[in-house]
Amino acid sequence: MTATDRIHSLQVRHASLEEKLDNESGRPLPDEVAIHDLKRQKLAIKDEIARLQRP
């Protein structure tokens, strides 16, 4: 898997987590632990993408 492929895969996963986060946040009683975990996962993916994009 090339770096470009890995970045694309991470971007897809990041978008999926964003959708899950939006769904959870929109619930009448959102699960704050789940929201925290989703945000943590998104940040880790964002950091990994940034690391892979560095020259």
Image (cartoon, rainbow, N blue to C red):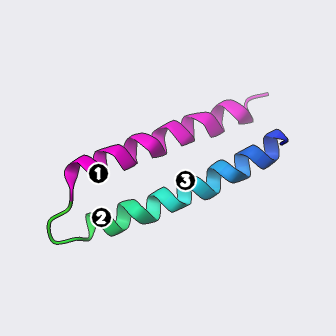
- Badge 1 marks a residue whose secondary structure is helix
- Give the residue at x 47% y 40%: 43
Which residue is most to the right? 2
Give the magenta range: 31-55
Q: Are marks 2 and 3 in contact (CB under 8 Å)?
A: no
The amino acid type of the residue labelled 2 equals Glu
The amino acid type of the residue labelled 3 equals His
19 left or right of 52?
Answer: left
Q: CA distance from mark 3 to mark 1?
A: 15 Å
Mark 2 highlights which residue?
A: 24
The amino acid type of the residue labelled 1 equals Ala
Any mark on residue 14, and which?
3
Q: Is residue 40 magenta?
A: yes
- Badge 2 marks a residue whose secondary structure is helix
- Give the residue at x 61% y 35%: 48
46 left or right of 36?
Answer: right
Q: Quadrant of residue 53?
A: top right
Q: Few, some or many C-alpha atoms within 10 Å of disc 1 (few <14, some 14-19, many ≥20)? A: some
Give how far across and how far down residue 39 sits, in percent: 38, 46
Disc 3 or 1, which lies upstream in sequence? 3
Where 46 falls versus 9 (above or below)?
A: above
**Main secondary structure along the magenta-highlighted residues:** helix
Any mark on residue 34, and which?
1
